[in-house]
Image (cartoon, rainbow, N blue to C red):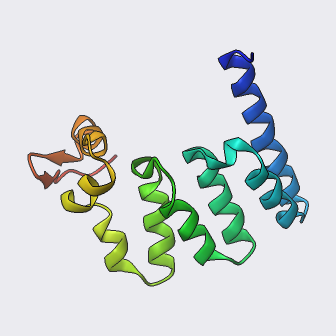
Amino acid sequence: MWSWNATAVLATLLFERVEVLARSGRVEQAIAELRAHHEGGTWYGSSKLADLLVLAGRPGEAIQTLESTDDSARTAARLAVLLVDQSRVEEALALFTPEEASASDEDGAFWRQLHREGRVVGDEPARTMDR
């Protein structure tokens, strides 16, 4: 059985490989290899796959990939950017409303993270600027 470290190393090698494939113009091969690997179904793998799909000129598929990710709280920001790029601003904004977050994030981890980071105070976005 693989240890966690060996698994992490293999995942890193996969992501580096698909990056090299994409940069050398073999985007379709990179997409196929990532989809065929079990890491492609993780939140991080889904984010990488979405980036490759955008590079291949398939933003609709990229959006579907991120929407189908089990850990949507981790991919919400990337999904929002893709939705805005496709002029779907209201859908992007809906990702950051308490109602939408509770539907996909039942234990509220997404909102707790925003509270910890100081981006939300009470139920309102923090009125501070990042420096």
Q: Quadrant of the N terminus?
A: top right
Q: Classify 80 as above or below 105.
A: below
Lateral position of residue 51 relative to residue 37, left or right: left
Rendered location of residue 104, percent (x, y): 33, 54
Q: Which residue is the extreme one toward the left? A: 122
- Give me the residue at 76% from left, 52% from top: 34
Q: Along the line of sight, which residue is nearer the eye, 6 or 20?
A: 6
Rendered location of residue 35, percent (x, y): 74, 55
Lateral position of residue 43 relative to residue 14, left or right: left
Rendered location of residue 16, percent (x, y): 79, 42
- The picture quadrant where one finds residue 21 is bottom right
- Give me the residue at 32% from left, 63% from top: 95
- The picture quadrant where one finds residue 54 is bottom right
Number of marks drawn: 0
Lateral position of residue 93 relative to residue 74, left or right: left
Q: Along the line of sight, which residue is nearer the eye, 126 or 78?
A: 78
Rendered location of residue 61, percent (x, y): 62, 72
Q: Classify 88 as above or below 125.
A: below
Q: Which residue is the extreme one toward the front? A: 1
- Give me the residue at 41% from left, 81% from top: 88
- Give me the residue at 24% from left, 38% from top: 112
